[in-house]
Amino acid sequence: MIWHIARRELLEHVRSARFLTLCGLALLLLPLSAHVNVAHYRARLAQTAELRAAQQRRIAEPVTESGAYASRYGWRDGETMADPALRALRGPSRFAVLAMGADGALPAYWQFGTEGVEAGPAASGGNAAEAGMDAVFIVQVVLGLLALLLVFDAISGERESGVLRLLLAAPVPRGDLLLGKALGTAMTLALPLLLGLAGALVVTEVQGVSLLRDGGAPRLTVFLAASALYLLHMVALGLAVSSVTARPRSSWVAVLLLWIGLVLVAPRATEMVAATLEPVPPAFEARQARAAAIRQLQAERARALSVIWERVAGVDTVPEGQLPRTVRESYRDASAEQERIFSARKRATIRQVDLDRARRAERHARLVRHAGRFSPASSYAALAADLAGTGREAGRRWLDQVAAHQERLEGATFDRRYGLELFPRELGFLRIIWWPDLADAADRPPGYTELPAFAYREPSLEAVLAGAVPELGVLTAGAVAWLLVAMAAFQRAEIQ
Amino acid sequence: MLEAIHLSKTYRNGVRALSDLSLRVPDGELYCLLGANGAGKTTTLSCFLDFTVPTSGQAVVDGIVVAERPLEAKRRCGYVAERVAVYETLSAVENLRYFARLGGVRLTRAAAARALADAGLDEFQQSRPVRQYSKGMRQKLAIAIAISRGADNLLLDEPTAGLDPTAARELMTLLERVRADGCAILMSTHDVFRAARHADRIGIMRSGALVREFAPRHLTRHEIGAVYADCGGAAVPA
């Protein structure tokens, strides 16, 4: 019987002007947005290729003087050198064509260095066009509105017209009537969703960006399921409104307000609330704090090393020319322990500054996510972006892997000593450096190719799905809850 | 058979719609409920269809208490509302097939067309969208829907209201045919004369209570009109 009711609802909906209008809009916008976003994707690919080429050029440069190793010489007064060879490059996700998420806002690369990791510029480079339309936005806004428009008068409209009396006079459980209406509307919405996404896929395939190949099909399936779940949530919400309101005009006003509130306002409001309650200090503040702490440590280090130099050399003056090997070795041995302690303190200081900011960013993100769960549109956007690999989860995964690689580089080169640094008292805290001997493999830093290479490990589909479970759960629970509200109101309704 | 046993109903807004109403409509009988607007006629019908749950008392259909087994009770009832509302974009055939299926009866297109023809809708009218129908045509469709599932009981809420005399006469002829098949018919109406002519019994309601019940064959139309006016109904022209 549910199927019988659903089929009639489907036939009624597909002939309605509201369906034809919004369905047409979705069918136009979905392929169009895919077309525009493929261009963004290509621009990002070109940007990454350029960065990679610069990286390769730098790696291939012959090292003719020891100063070329400057980016790996331990202490830099708080500033990380912009060495193109020591970068983690983040290419675009092809699924950003459908769900841009935070793809444009995340850095195009992260710079590794002696003073920690620095985020590069945002991938979008401030290009406002990238904040435009994607499939997620169209499903969220256009199809979300269509879902509400199809069901807002499903009960209240039939109550006012009188059809409900005839329906309820039939020996059909009220729950079946409601489920039939929900199913019929869901089937109706499946048409623009499937056709629109199929159109978008055709556009991307024609333009040479395949979303189906290389394991893309399962992701797309889950993306489709998430979209369907969001629309089902909206249908259930609309049915609940229709069941609790007496007249279709009241239902219309209520769903319109809910749509504005949940789809347009809530996602931005949650960001605003989170920015007020859990502000994240700007990156440059963290950079300044880090630089100040390192400068202070550097001063302490200089004082400690000048004492050691006096003890080893017996003088507090700067020697002329290259130091005899025996003096260099004695000084290095004598200062090794101090250097180790200062390096550890420096790392701890950097980590503390970074950790403070990361914690606040994490609290901010958690607040946005949790508060966003009140809005199905926010949950859906977060879910779709995570599935596409362009969400906050992907950003966190990149940061984790970048941080782990930085630690590997610290062990391999950043925290090791090459050449010598002297801080003779007569010159105050002026640092004198003897560059390492290039001919001596034990003295010089390792070449780029000798360092561990950064390779981002894509999470498996299972891991992505596991991460998506909370949002899927929230959307499912919301849909069920609204359906129960509709059911309870409809069951209790007296037809006068 | 339809039976109301001490039915009382007070709505959530405090309005007392029924007050200890008892009546019985055996199979093959047409029972007309008369009464002014707000007397409780529609609420009485609503109790048989589970549109509303009585505050006390029982509505019983063929021995089944509606509040206890509403679906089984509804399976045995056909219903015609005062204002016939069906799906406007569908044709009569499509509406009939849809609502018959909801009632558990699968009608072929041909069977639906026959049923509509029996109710007085010709082939041309059957294929037009219902939004183009007159009130009389809508009533015929509603009757066809009501009897399509072969229910033994028929509930009609002021079915002749707004119909022209010919359409009303055709409707009553149709009801007589259904009654002759053994159907129990409970009909609310303001049409005293038609009730007097066709009903086996008449009940007059006032303020939710059944204040008079009689067989019209024992009274003249004039006497029935007087009784109706006496019981709070509208004055009946002589």
Image: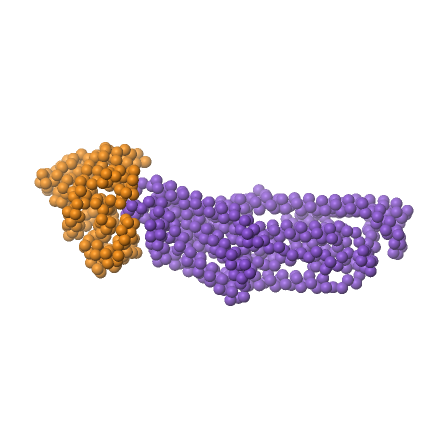
In this rendering, would A78 be left or right of A274? right
Image coordinates for residue A315, horizontal then vertical, percent: 90, 47
Is residue B34 depicted above or below A405 in this figure?
above
Residue reaching furthest right? A314
Residue at point 48%, 64% (across, down)? A202
Q: Nearer the viewer, residue A341 or B197?
A: A341
Residue at point 33%, 54% (across, down)? A8
Residue at point 57%, 58% (across, down)? A93
Q: Tell me, yes or no, if residue A265 can be seen here.
A: no
In this rendering, would B218 be left or right of A490? left
Image coordinates for residue A137, horizontal then vertical, percent: 49, 55
Residue at point 86%, 51% (across, down)? A329
Quadrant position of residue A344: top right
Q: What sort of colour scheme is used for the picture?
A: by chain
Quadrant position of residue A487: top left
In this rendering, would B26 be left or right of B65? left
Image coordinates for residue A334, horizontal then vertical, percent: 84, 46
Image coordinates for residue A281, horizontal then vertical, percent: 63, 46
In the rendered image, the quadrant that contains the C terminus of chain A is top left
Numbered label tally: 0
Quadrant position of residue A277: top right
Q: Tell me, yes or no, if residue B213 can be seen here.
A: yes
Q: Nearer the viewer, residue A132 or B3?
A: B3
The purple-tinted chain is A
Is residue B140 depicted above or below B73 in this figure?
below
The orange-tinted chain is B
